[in-house]
Image: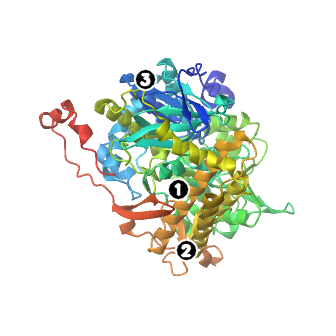
Amino acid sequence: MSLSVPQNILDALTDVVMPRLKPEPQVVETTRVGDFDLPVYRTGALVIGSGAAGLRAAVEMKRRGIDVTIISQSAWGGTSACSGSDKQTLHTANTKDQGDNFQAMAEAIRAGGAMDEDTAYIEAVGSVRAMSSLQYLGLPLPQDHLGGTLRYQTDHDEVGRATSCGPRTSRLMVKVLAKEAIGLDIPFFNQTTAVKLLKDGQGVNGLLAIRPKEGTDANPYGLALYPCSALVIAAGGPGEMYRDSVFPNGCFGTLGMALEAGLELTNITESQFGISTRREGFPWNLSGTYVQVIPHIYSVDGDGTEHHFLADYYRTTQEMASNIFRKGYQWPFHASRMLDFQSSLVDLAIFRESQKGRRVYMDFNRNPEAIDVPFSLERLDPDVSTYLRNAGADQTLPIDRLRHMNPLAIELYKRYKVDISADPLEFAVNNQHMNGGIAVDIWGRTKVPGVYAVGEASGTHGATRPGGSALNAGQVFGTRVAEHIGATGNAASPSQSDIANAAAPAVSEVTRHLDSDSTLTWKAIRTDVQARMSDHAGILCNASDVSKALADARALNARIRDHGIAVSRKTEIARVVQWQQIALASEAVLTALDHYIANGGGSRGARAICDPRGESLPQSVHGPLPEVRFRAERDADKNSQLKLRREGADFVITEIPNRSYDGDKSFFERDWPAWLTGDIYRRAAET
């Protein structure tokens, strides 16, 4: 079957070659800050990040005549360009099969709670425009012979609004947007790390960054200044915060930088975790057909002995196999799905095997081993057998079912020297996405005038979201940010005013580590933070562990404040600042999580709040699992968000009700004047 797919299609959908960047602008201005001569690159608007959301914002601004510049730590190296699953999802209104109404879609997007109602409606309404514009740019979404976009059901989606180009959907999104940005001659600075936001009395006025290639005798650490009057944060999530992570290497995000700049964060208790291969090899989510073909899952201990460990959790072969299949569209771990022998019991079992020091594999050349009777495609739950029958997936072995349903899934791993048709695939439960982030209003604005946030950097996703809705959200809000900046004139090119005064404190804060006699290294911070977050703030949390982890995080940050971080060579300075900021962001997450648990918060999204007095008790085939008894989610928690800001060395948390949306129907003649006068851009809700 795989040979019937033309090679050019395989190449286009699995080995996406990104466009070449144009030469960077030359330095035309320098300014003296302290002991350094810094290059200055002035722009009206600055976008931090080169993923799908940031590129969308930049392209839409340029189309509106805005002077915009992009900086990126690693072009085409972030989550959008390097992550995915077997058929990575773009979640949009289903206008072909369902005749979707936007209110229903908005309700589905925010069904997990802790999400503003107006934001959900904005994402629903904007999804059609987002998808159509991507298709216009060349995104190869599959169609039927009548022109309808093909759809399927994804996690937390009961309607079937998902569509996909295959495993590299988000990378293809980046490719078409990058080609457009390059074609529009948007200046692009690669290998550039954002480290400090610069502000004056009116709001943002620039950014301090580190560019090693700018290093000179008068600027040995490669510091650079980007004066601007509008700044869009689109640098993704804090993937480096967890040891067990499917994020590409080097994804630091900007939460620590945002906290230092006085921005407010929201919902940072909420993340996604699920089964995937680790980033030490080829990091990839194992959702969709990887598990819908029902491979054999087993573990191996230190002596090399195999363990059919799922037999310790499920009662029958049919029950086990059906729930392995369901991980395809119920991919994220969810506490409630540990109950009644549902699909997240698979995640729990894998997680516990890893805690024992065992390595876990899926083998596509073996069907699941028997629990009571041998595995058979004739003995599966109705929803599973119906799906496989409709897909024509009646082949004997999982690899043949995968080759039939999704040959791209096999080809993708081959591109990275992993042949799943021949060898078992090692995997684990890993951190995949931060659902919280920087608090924004309906136009993507933060509390600091002129600063916006889009994509995973923004905290718009709620506790639980349909698969692929984050990709849609980045496109919708990238466009809205550009509309707001363009309509309000927030990106007038800055004057030739001296930016040195604003930059001086930031430069001093960054370079203070150079004079430190600290023995604390960024590598030690990495080990400390990642172990703490993976071991105590993963899918299973309890009050005492989180409180202890928070105390340790506070102690680490106090040590950093008092003594700095050792810098062994000048090229390390960017990494030192990034780990200092990740340590700060980690403390913020644990502060919010500790507050949530201490105030009675229940299990929701990707975390089970374990409590010996909890209402929910998962069962295995051997009986109850009291060590993972957990609190049920409270309805009240769905209706609000925890917002956090930094005050000095401390964090302040407030609980804010979700913004509402009354669903009033628009009326053309009544509402047109607000658009004509620009009043719609002044009606932004409070963040």
Q: Residue furthest bottom?
A: 613
Residue at 26% x, 38% y: name it: 681
Counting from the top left corner in percent of width and height, residue 138 is at 49, 23
- Asked if residue 564 is positioned above or below residue 99 in the image, the reply reads below
- The three-letter code of the residue at mark 2 reads Ala
* For the residues bearing labels 3 and 2, Cβ distance under 8 angstroms: no
Residue placed at 67% from the left, 35% from the top?
412
In the figure, 45 relative to 194: above or below?
A: above
At 32% from the left edge and 35% from the top edge, which residue is drawn? Answer: 484
Q: Check disc 3 and report the residue beneath it.
A: 136
Front one among 209 and 159 = 209
The label nearer to you, 3 versus 2, is: 2
Q: Please rate how many residues cluster around mark 2, counting C-alpha atoms within 10 Å: few if below 14, some from 14 to 19, many from 20.
A: some
Query: What number is the disc on residue 271?
Result: 1
Residue assigned mark 2? 543
Rendering coords of residue 204 (x, y %)? 41, 40
**Is residue 56 found left or right of 321 in the rendered image?**
left
Q: Amino acid at mark 1?
A: Ser
Distance of mark 1 from mark 3, alpha carbons?
Answer: 32 Å
Question: Which of the two labelled residues, at mark 1 and mark 2, occupies the earlier sequence position?
Answer: 1
Query: Looking at the image, which is closer to me, 532 or 44?
Result: 44
Q: Position of residue 530 (x, y in %)?
A: 66, 57
**Mark found first going from the N terminus, 3 or 2:** 3
Q: Position of residue 5 (x, y in %)?
A: 63, 26
Residue lying at the far right in this picture: please name it. Answer: 303
Q: Answer whether residue 454 is visible to the viewer in this image.
A: no
Q: Secondary structure at mark 2?
A: helix
